[in-house]
Amino acid sequence: MSQTDKLIEQHVREYESRLLHIDELLAKAREKGATPESHQDLAEVTQQREQLAGHVATLKSGHDPREVEDILQHGPMGIWDVMAQKLEHVIERLEKK
C-alpha cells in the first residue's frame, strides 16, 4: 500500500468518524423538536453533511485522482467543526425552550 493510499484511508476514517458525530448531533436536535429558528439551521447542516458525505465517497472510490487530491489538499475539516458547533448551539437553544 502506497503512502498516498494510507493517507486517503486515514482521511476516510477521520471523515467517517466526524459524519457519525454530526449524525448523532442531528438526531439529538431532532429529538428535542424543531423550532422555526432551528429548522433552518438543521436544514443547512443536513445539506452540508450530504456534501461532505460525497467527499468521503469520492475518497473511497478514488475514481477521480484530481478530485481526491483536491479534497486531501483543502480538506473539509474546518467545515466539520463549524457544523458541529452550529448543531451544539441549536441543541442548547432547544433544551432551553
Image (cartoon, helix red, strand yellow):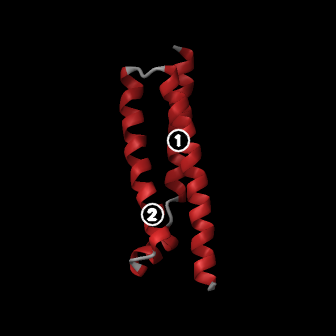
The residue shown at (42%, 22%) is 34
Which one is earlier in the sequence, the residue at label 2 or at label 1? 1
The residue shown at (49%, 60%) is 76
Between 10 and 94, the one lying in front of the other is 10
Residue flagged by tag 2: what amino acid is it?
Ala
Provide the secondary structure element on which disc 2 rests.
Answer: helix
The residue shown at (42%, 80%) is 65
Is residue 95 placed above or below 56 in the rendered structure? Answer: above
**Few, some or many residues within 10 Å of mark 2 (<14, 14–19, 20+):** some
In which quadrant of the rendered view does residue 3 lie? bottom right
The residue shown at (51%, 28%) is 29
Q: Are marks 2 and 1 in contact (CB under 8 Å)?
A: no
Viewport quadrant of the N terminus: bottom right
**Few, some or many residues within 10 Å of mark 1 (<14, 14–19, 20+):** some
Task: List x then y, in percent, for residue 21.
Answer: 59, 44
Taking 79 as reference, is 3 left or right?
right
In which quadrant of the rendered view does residue 5 lie? bottom right
Is residue 22 placed above or below 55 in the rendered structure? Answer: above
Disc marking residue 51: none
Residue flagged by tag 1: what amino acid is it?
Asp
Between 84 and 13, the one lying in front of the other is 13
Disc marking residue 23: 1
Is residue 73 placed above or below 19 in the rendered structure? Answer: below
Q: Residue furthest top?
A: 97
Disc marking residue 57: 2
